[in-house]
Image: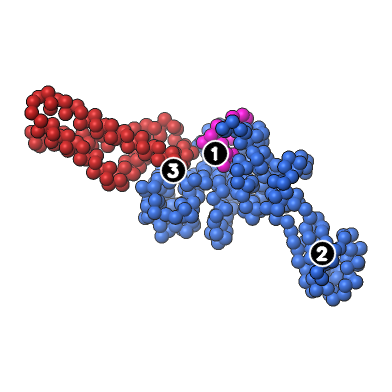
Chain colours: A red, B blue
Amino acid sequence: MGFAYLARYYLKRTLRHRTLVLAGLALPLIGGVIGIALPGANARLVCAWACPAACAMLVFAWIWLLGQMDRVGGLTDGIGSTPLPGNVIMASRVAAGAALLAAQMTVFTAVLVLIH
Amino acid sequence: MIALDNVGLRADGKWVLWDVSLELASGEITGVLGRSGSGKTALARILAGLDEPTRGGIVFGELGDCDKRIVSVALSTPAVARELTVFENLEMFASLWGVSRRGRAREISFLLELMGLSDSRGCRADTLSSGALQRMEIARALVADAPVLVIDSLLDTLDRRLLEKLWDHLLKIRREESKCIIVFTSRGRIAEMCGKITVIHRGRLMFIGRPDDFRRAAGEDMVVLGDMADPAVKNRIGEKLSVVVKEEDGFLSFKVSNGERAITDLLAEFGSQLNCVYLKRPTLDDALDVIAGGGDGYCVEASKEAN
């Protein structure tokens, strides 16, 4: 249960950063529009790979940054002193990142379906 | 319940802790007194399972070596998620410690009230003052349902009223839940409230025992008598109590090991001739100064006395 709680709180914390949320939503939106607007099947194929890759990089950069901020701020020690094992803490962070990435991919797919 | 056996910690090429052997029982409040840089935080982190000792080890009694699961720690650097509100922070830690959903809100509300944070429950942690963050850190440690509670230097900055309120709560949980509470402090007045103290200086344990016994390291009590009706009484006091009475600026004073008892004897014998009696007792801070000045010399004396 601790895993799910912690992942939920990582998500909650991320959603409190409005600029990041806007950037996270804008990236698949713009990527989807460019993918459709670009002429040629090859360009579209490149965009279909590049946009999810950029989203993944953004999400995991954020999760890594969150981890560094927690380390400097002392939260890592606080969570580390709870009964949760270290690998569960790490897994919950990855799970939160995966959830954010899934949300971005939903936006990306929705743009492709709606405009195409 | 917890036994530290020759624990040592080496960091950046030097020993931060050396040969720390200590037993901590449940149902007891132990104060760890030491100046800044004496190794208190290093010891607190080892107890919380955040750092591994370079040498020696810790045995957690009947609970085995599952150290991280039984020690709740309030660190001197508050561990807060700055994006979350005060309530959400405490709720997060309560859920990570497995506190039941039903009791969680009630317990958090109680702790917020206790720490004077009720008005800030909906405020984001990054808007709080450093004092409020420290109080929140104490609440965070208290919300955990752990048999061992470690508070690292956070009581030093609390105001008297809040400290008394919190101390009453600590006494209550010690009694009712038989918790083992370890309070790290650099203030003598806080260590004085603990039943047992451990004094740490430059990473070494210098004393383990009762605060009163440690206080004696700073010297004897001084009894001061002022406004004497009959100056001739000076010699009679010296004879009666077998002390050397000094006279300075119109005041008589003498040193004894137990000032309270000396005053009782004085009042019984010379009550009608005394207008003003004052007991000047060395504090734990004075005793700490003696250690800091005396260095290892005191270590031997204190250990002999403790044994």
Q: Residue at x 84, y 76 (%)?
A: B229
> Can residue A114 be seen?
yes
Query: What amino acid type is highlighted by mark number 3?
Result: Gly
Disc 1 to disc 2: CB gap under 8 Å: no
Q: Residue at x 55, y 47 (%)?
A: B151
Q: Residue at x 79, y 63 (%)?
A: B223
Task: Answer above or below: position of B235 versus B133.
Answer: below
The x, y position of residue B280, in whole percent, is: 74, 61
Query: What amino acid type is highlighted by mark number 2?
Result: Ser
Task: Answer above or below: position of A46 versus B30.
Answer: above
Q: Label 3 belongs to which residue? A: A73
The x, y position of residue B85, in whole percent, is: 37, 51
Q: Which mark is residue B253?
A: 2
Q: Label 1 belongs to which residue? A: B45
Chain of the residue under the numbered disc 1 shown in the image: B
Q: Is residue A2 left or right of residue A21?
A: right
Q: Is residue A80 left or right of residue B3?
A: left
Quadrant containing the N terminus of chain B is top right
Q: Which mark is residue A94?
A: none
**Helix, strand or loop status at disc 1:** helix
Query: What amino acid type is highlighted by mark number 1?
Result: Arg
Mark 1 surroundings within 10 Å by alpha-carbon count, few (fewer than 14), some (14 through 19), many (20 or more): many
